[in-house]
């Protein structure tokens, strides 16, 4: 298997006066969170292990205070972890020299910020060209690239505006264009849309999906909104109190939540958009007759009407074989939840 | 705090009194008793700090300064040799500026000097600056700058004003750049910041007279010393503002810097400084105002210019002349400030579209100014503003003061007498009667009560210092004079600030008024006040109040007008009347701002001491001034330190009070 | 072309020769003369400057505080302080001389007089003036709320010394001293009182424009003798010093001690410089009362009195 672009190995970040007492040689001396808390230490992240695969969108989600932003800062090489290793292309990110780290930031990473982080004294063009200016590229070249990026996010014609003259959505487009100007391998998005209105937010999510379709970057995306995570993610990590509760696809989280926390988190998710035929079918296939066929990987939403209209169950097909069946009652389960769960909740 | 508030409320004179305040009540009552007791009740050492216990710090400092300037070596170089070399270097930009603005390019020195090329003539400078202002901020600024310069030319202040402008320009640039550098160092290293902070406190509150002498010895008599003194006085706010502005840069922008791979230098110059610029300009404004504040004192040690004209005019009792020269200083201050603020690009204005025509205009105007300059070199006669076209309002002001003096002296005298007999003299007597160990104890206890052992030690030691160096009495007079003045300034300033916020037009005129008061050399209005109220504490008090009232007004207005709109609406919805909104919402919310204003008022009052010494007070300002006249370096520094300590004690207390609202 | 150039340089040379015809300046570095902030000093400074210029020296005027100027001279930053009054700067001058870097070039011939002074209209309110004994009965005439029932005597800045507190004690006068911080404040009060014909008695010194502009007289105290300030047994009060008027004092000239070697000629001129109170009073009045410029008044005197100052050069 190809090695992950970024990986965490037992990464912890501790805050507190006595934090250093519990770290030797880059490893925590205790596996018990309580021991730390009793010593007055807050573990912002604790023993996190993650693999982020190339070309995929990895979402880290959790509520505020869950440690997701700290984890992002560690992954991006902004904050060193107190213990553990961040591997970037299989090398410890924090063992690079300062100069090498600067080069990595310049050429291999880009970030979009929650509050846009636009420089108020620069125009749109100046902001987008800023990373290239820092790299010392000649003016003509950087302005040409910046123009291309501005077109990419649909802001052409506004190159000479200042950030204060733009709407929030437009500002974040500038942020996106800037983060892509250096042509990074890893693209970090730190709650990029949480400061925007819901309508604009959906538009921007679509924008990210569109860009990802074109650019195929490795994306690390932070959010506290599960719906948003579902829309953009290949894989999702759910964090709570500095620890990763579960990592998996949206469907995996929904179908087999590892903890109650994950279950609670995913309860109100748009199930029809997430679940595939495979995960809701009955595996004891009847011989038929079937009202139609669906692929095992099809999302429920894509065949829900067909199923609703059909009096017969649908056959679930994988590799031209029938591996299961779905009938209308299962649709109800998806919409209002399985019977047992509904009662339990 | 919690423990204290858990005490039951007591009842005094039929009114419920929070027992938390009881210790203070006891202290006040005890103080009054102690002050009223006949002095002979106390042992001798309590009545007056014994001379035998006195620390001869002043002598040590004098000896140290002597050693430093005569014997000390830095490698092969003597210290004074080193400072003289530094002084030579600092003189270069100064000479360049005065060459362009005031003296022209000279060959040779003194009376043998031959002017090879004249300084910029007034009309050329006006054209150049007006064109620049127009491109930077439009016609309003251009008209303003033109009017300002025309005032200087028409009222015959041009030559002196250019001398002052040259030296202030260089001093302000040095202060701004130096303050910025120090501020950045403070941000980078917290330790450095902690070490620098008390030094800044001292530099800000120590009267300039106190370090004038060492300055003269080390850097020589002349404009350079004046400039260094100016820089010392003006740099602290710049450092502080820089720290605040840089720390106020959002974390995200720093992260942006790291993520785009900024080196340290790029982070500073491309991210931190540009983003912090609007904040930094507040510091630049302070630097300019303070630099012009010391113009008078700087002129006493060789800077010449407008400050010298003010002194000379007042010495002749030419009040109008002094006022005109003083107003020229104000005009310079306002022009410098507005122009400096205009140099900051306005992010809200559209980009460089249309800038080509701007460029053409400015190029044309500069070329014209250059041509006129050359013309002035060829025909020197046109270079000067014609003397016959000069205006002077001097006689008017002289007559006005005389008229007021003759017709209103008696009613004014009644006010003065009342204040003297019922406020100033009793307070003075009270302060002087307090035994020094008692005051030191109370100050230390207050420190302990408010901020703990560290604060107690700091303020206690500072307070004790004044007794130990034998300056207790002048220190108490200082405290009394500044204390009464500050109370009056707050009593006048807070209502004015409150009223002004309700009426924008009033705010405008109040602002003009306090800006003028702050930049107009105090000496200009002190002499007419002397004519009306005679030499003495009352006159000094008016001077201090006039100078120190500005922050009282400004901070109150700021606090009152920056109450969140939602709070006001909440008040309206609960049915508050306007008065209730003011009393219940605006004032409590503005309290921290008002406390900051009080802090600034105290510091300004203390810095005014140097000037009031010139109209005959007997406080620490007088001690510093007298030390200067006796060339007693040590005594000057020690007295200056006492002034600084009074400022720092009040500063620490007020900051502590802001930190713990409700205590 | 070349001939033209030659001509010019010759002319230039002639000019130089013309300038140095009187005396060859030993150094072309500028001699720095301090400008203090009262008219008399400015006139003296400019007269000295003009004469030195005529003698071929290079002159620079530096505005300087009266008291701060001494440390300037000690460093050699300033060269000449034209007027150092025995009455106001004796201590500072002595301290400076003690460093060995400042030299006292002796009296300028002018006598500083300073004493208690009252406007003429006070003679009616306090009969017997200018005799000092009249003051014994006039305390209330001069009193103010702060000093009541004693009279208020406005002294000079406390830095001027003057022993007025001791004088009041020794002569048993019903007065209290209030110190003005600067002489600007001093004269501001006088002006104010004079305009209203209000009672005032204060410290005035001459040569100065004030006694020329305002009518009044000095109080006549028992005449000063050195014994009065040193020996309690002297004078009316056998147990106290200072039972007399203030001393008359010369106005000295002080220079940087390096001047002697650097510009010996100029040094000699300053040393020989002599003036008198009457002439200075007249010049003073021309500036302060008639509004003439200091530079013009000085120039005018130098032009008209060539015989006087020529003598200072030749010695």
Image: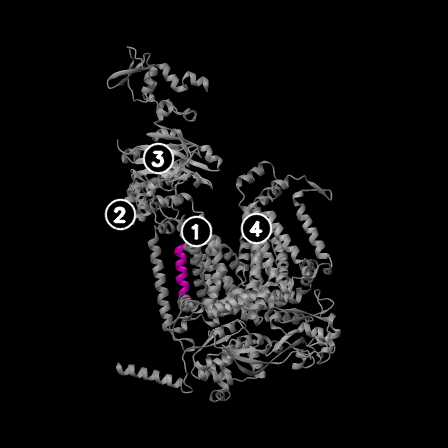
Left or right relative to A274: residue C202: right
Q: Which chain does tag 2 point to? A: A
Q: Which residue is mark 4?
A: B455
List the single residue furthest toward the left: A320
Q: Which residue is mark 1?
A: B189
Left or right relative to A106: residue B503: right
- Depth-wise, is mark 4 or mark 3 nearer the camera? 3
Measured in 3D between alpha carbons, the distance from the residue under mark 4 to the one under mark 1, in whole angstroms, is 23 Å
The answer, for residue C287, to whether it is visible in the render is no
Where's the N terminus of chain B, which quadrant? top right
**Do circles 4 and 3 both sit on a common chain?**
no
Q: Which residue is mark 2?
A: A141
Q: Quadrant of residue A314?
A: top left
Q: Which chain does tag 4 point to? A: B
Measured in 3D between alpha carbons, the distance from the residue under mark 2 to the one under mark 3, in whole angstroms, is 39 Å
Percent x, y of residue A98? 33, 47
Answer whether residue B131 is magenta in the image. yes
The span picked out in magenta is B122-141
On residue A9, the disc is 3
**Do circles 4 and 1 both sit on a common chain?**
yes
């Amino acid at each position: 298997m190809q090695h992950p672009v970024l990986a965490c190995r037992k990464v912890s970040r501790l805050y507190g006066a006595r934090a250093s007492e519990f770290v030797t040689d880059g490893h925590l001396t205790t596996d018990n969170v309580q021991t730390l808390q009793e010593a007055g230490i807050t573990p912002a992240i604790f023993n996190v292990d993650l693999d982020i695969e190339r070309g995929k969108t990895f979402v880290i989600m959790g509520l505020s205070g869950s440690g997701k932003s700290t984890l992002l800062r560690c992954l991006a090489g902004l904050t060193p972890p107190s213990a553990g290793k961040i591997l970037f292309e299989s090398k410890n990110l924090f063992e690079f020299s300062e100069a090498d780290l600067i080069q990595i930031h310049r050429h291999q990473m880009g970030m979009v910020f929650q509050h846009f982080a636009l420089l108020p004294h620069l125009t749109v063009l100046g902001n987008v060209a800023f990373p290239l200016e820092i790299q010392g590229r000649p003016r003509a070249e950087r302005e040409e690239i910046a123009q291309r990026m501005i077109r990419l996010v649909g802001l052409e014609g506004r190159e000479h505006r200042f950030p204060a003259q733009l709407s929030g959505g437009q500002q974040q487009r500038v942020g996106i264009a800037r983060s892509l100007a250096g042509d990074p391998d890893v693209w970090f998005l730190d709650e990029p849309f949480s400061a925007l209105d819901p309508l604009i937010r959906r538009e921007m999510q679509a924008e990210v999906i569109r860009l990802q379709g074109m650019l195929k970057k490795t994306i690390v995306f932070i959010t506290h909104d599960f719906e948003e995570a579902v829309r953009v993610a290949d894989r999702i990590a759910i964090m709570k109190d500095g620890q990763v509760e579960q990592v998996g696809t949206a469907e995996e989280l929904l179908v087999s939540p590892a903890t109650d926390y994950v279950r609670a988190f995913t309860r109100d998710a748009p199930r029809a958009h997430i679940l595939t035929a495979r995960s809701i079918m009955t595996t004891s296939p009847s011989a038929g007759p079937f009202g139609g066929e669906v692929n095992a990987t099809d999302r429920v939403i894509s065949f829900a009407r067909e199923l609703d209209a059909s009096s017969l169950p649908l056959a679930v097909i994988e590799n031209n074989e029938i591996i299961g069946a779905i009938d209308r009652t299962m649709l109800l389960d998806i919409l209002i939840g399985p019977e047992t769960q509904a009662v339990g909740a | 705090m919690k423990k204290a508030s858990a005490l039951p409320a007591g009842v005094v004179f039929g009114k419920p009194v929070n027992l938390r305040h009881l210790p203070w009540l006891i202290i006040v009552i005890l103080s009054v008793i102690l002050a009223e007791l006949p002095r002979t009740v106390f042992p001798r050492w309590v009545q007056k700090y014994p001379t035998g216990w006195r620390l001869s710090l002043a002598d040590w400092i004098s000896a140290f300064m002597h050693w430093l300037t005569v014997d000390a070596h830095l490698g092969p170089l003597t210290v004074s040799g080193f400072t003289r070399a530094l002084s030579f270097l600092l003189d270069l930009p100064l000479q360049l500026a005065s060459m362009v603005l005031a003296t022209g390019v000279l060959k040779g020195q003194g009376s043998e000097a031959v002017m090879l090329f004249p300084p910029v003539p007034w009309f050329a400078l006006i054209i150049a600056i007006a064109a620049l202002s127009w491109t930077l901020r439009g016609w309003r600024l251009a008209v303003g700058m033109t009017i300002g310069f025309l005032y200087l030319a028409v009222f015959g202040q041009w030559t002196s004003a250019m001398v002052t402008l040259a030296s202030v320009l260089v001093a302000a640039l040095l202060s701004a750049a130096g303050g910025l550098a120090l501020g950045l160092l403070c941000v980078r290293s917290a330790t450095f910041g902690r070490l620098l902070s008390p030094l800044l406190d001292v530099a800000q509150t120590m009267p300039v007279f106190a370090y004038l002498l060492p300055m003269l010895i080390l850097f020589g008599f002349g404009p350079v010393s004046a400039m260094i003194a100016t820089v010392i006085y003006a740099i602290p706010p710049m450092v502080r503002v820089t720290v605040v502005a840089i720390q106020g840069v959002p974390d995200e922008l720093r992260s942006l810097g790291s993520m785009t791979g900024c080196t340290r230098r790029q982070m500073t110059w491309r991210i931190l400084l540009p983003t912090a610029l609007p904040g930094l300009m507040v510091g630049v404004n302070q630097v300019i105002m303070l630099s012009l504040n010391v113009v008078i004192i700087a002129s006493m040690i060789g800077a010449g210019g407008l400050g010298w004209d003010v002194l000379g005019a007042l010495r002749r009792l030419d009040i109008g002349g002094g006022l005109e020269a003083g107003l020229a200083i104000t005009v310079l201050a306002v022009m410098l400030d507005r122009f400096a603020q205009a140099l900051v690009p306005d992010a809200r204005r559209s980009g460089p579209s249309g800038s080509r025509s701007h460029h053409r205009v400015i190029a044309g105007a500069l070329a014209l100014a250059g041509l006129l300059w050359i013309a002035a070199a060829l025909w020197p006669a046109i270079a000067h503003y014609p003397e016959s076209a000069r205006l002077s309002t001097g006689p008017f002001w002289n007559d006005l003061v005389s008229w007021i003096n003759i017709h209103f002296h008696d009613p004014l005298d009644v006010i003065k007498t009342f204040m003297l007999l019922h406020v100033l003299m009793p307070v003075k007597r009270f302060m002087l009667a307090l035994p020094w160990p008692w005051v030191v104890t109370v100050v230390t206890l207050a420190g302990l009560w408010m901020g703990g052992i560290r604060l107690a030690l700091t303020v206690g030691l500072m307070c004790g210092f004044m007794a130990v160096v034998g300056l207790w009495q002048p220190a108490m007079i200082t405290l009394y004079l500044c204390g009464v003045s500050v109370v009056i300034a707050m009593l006048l300033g807070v209502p004015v600030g409150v009223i002004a916020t309700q009426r924008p037009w009033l705010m405008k005129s109040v602002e003009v008024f306090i800006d003028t008061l702050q930049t107009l050399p105090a000496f200009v209005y002190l002499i007419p006040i002397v004519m009306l109220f005679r030499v003495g504490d009352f006159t000094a008090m008016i001077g201090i109040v006039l100078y120190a009232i500005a922050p009282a007004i400004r901070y109150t207005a700021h606090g009152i007008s920056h109450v969140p709109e939602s709070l006001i609406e909440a008040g309206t919805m609960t049915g508050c009347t306007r008065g209730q909104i003011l009393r219940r919402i605006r004032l409590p919310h503005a309290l921290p701002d008002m406390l900051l204003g009080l802090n600034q008022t105290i510091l300004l009052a203390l810095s005014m001491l140097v000037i009031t010494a010139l109209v005959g007070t007997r406080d620490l300002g007088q001690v510093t001034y007298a030390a200067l006249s006796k060339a007693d370096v040590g005594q000057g520094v020690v007295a200056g330190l006492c002034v600084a300590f009074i400022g720092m004690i009040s500063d620490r207390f007020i900051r502590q009070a802001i930190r713990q609202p409700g205590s | 072309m070349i001939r033209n150039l030659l001509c010019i340089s010759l002319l230039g040379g002639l000019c130089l020769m013309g300038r140095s015809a009187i005396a060859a300046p030993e150094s072309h570095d500028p001699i720095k003369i301090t400008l203090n902030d009262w008219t008399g000093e400015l006139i003296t400074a400019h007269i000295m400057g003009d004469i030195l210029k005529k003698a071929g020296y290079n002159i620079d005027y530096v505005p300087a505080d009266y008291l701060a100027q001494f440390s300037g001279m000690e460093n050699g930053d300033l060269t000449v302080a034209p007027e150092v009054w025995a009455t106001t700067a004796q201590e500072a001058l002595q301290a400076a001389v003690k460093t060995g870097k400042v030299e006292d070039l002796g009296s300028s011939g002018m006598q500083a007089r300073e004493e208690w002074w009252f406007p003429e209209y006070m003679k009616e309110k306090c009969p017997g003036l200018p005799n000092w004994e009249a003051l014994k009965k006039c305390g209330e005439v001069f009193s103010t709320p702060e000093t009541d029932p004693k009279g208020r005597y406005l002294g000079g800045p406390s830095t001027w010394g003057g022993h007025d507190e001791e004088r009041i004690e020794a002569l048993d006068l019903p007065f209290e001293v209030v110190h003005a911080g600067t002489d600007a404040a001093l004269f501001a009060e006088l002006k104010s009182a004079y305009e209203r014909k209000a009672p005032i008695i204060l410290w005035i010194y001459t040569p100065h424009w004030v006694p020329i502009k305002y009518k009044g007289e000095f109080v006549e105290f028992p005449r000063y003798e050195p014994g009065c300030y040193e020996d309690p047994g002297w004078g009316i009060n056998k147990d106290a010093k200072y039972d007399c008027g203030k001393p008359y004092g010369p106005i000295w000239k002080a220079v940087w001690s390096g001047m002697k070697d650097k510009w010996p000629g100029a040094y000699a001129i300053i040393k020989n410089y002599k003036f008198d109170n009457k002439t200075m009073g007249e010049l003073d009045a021309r500036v302060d009362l008639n509004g003439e410029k200091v530079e013009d008044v000085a120039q005018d005197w130098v032009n008209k009195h060539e015989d006087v100052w020529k003598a200072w050069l030749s010695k």
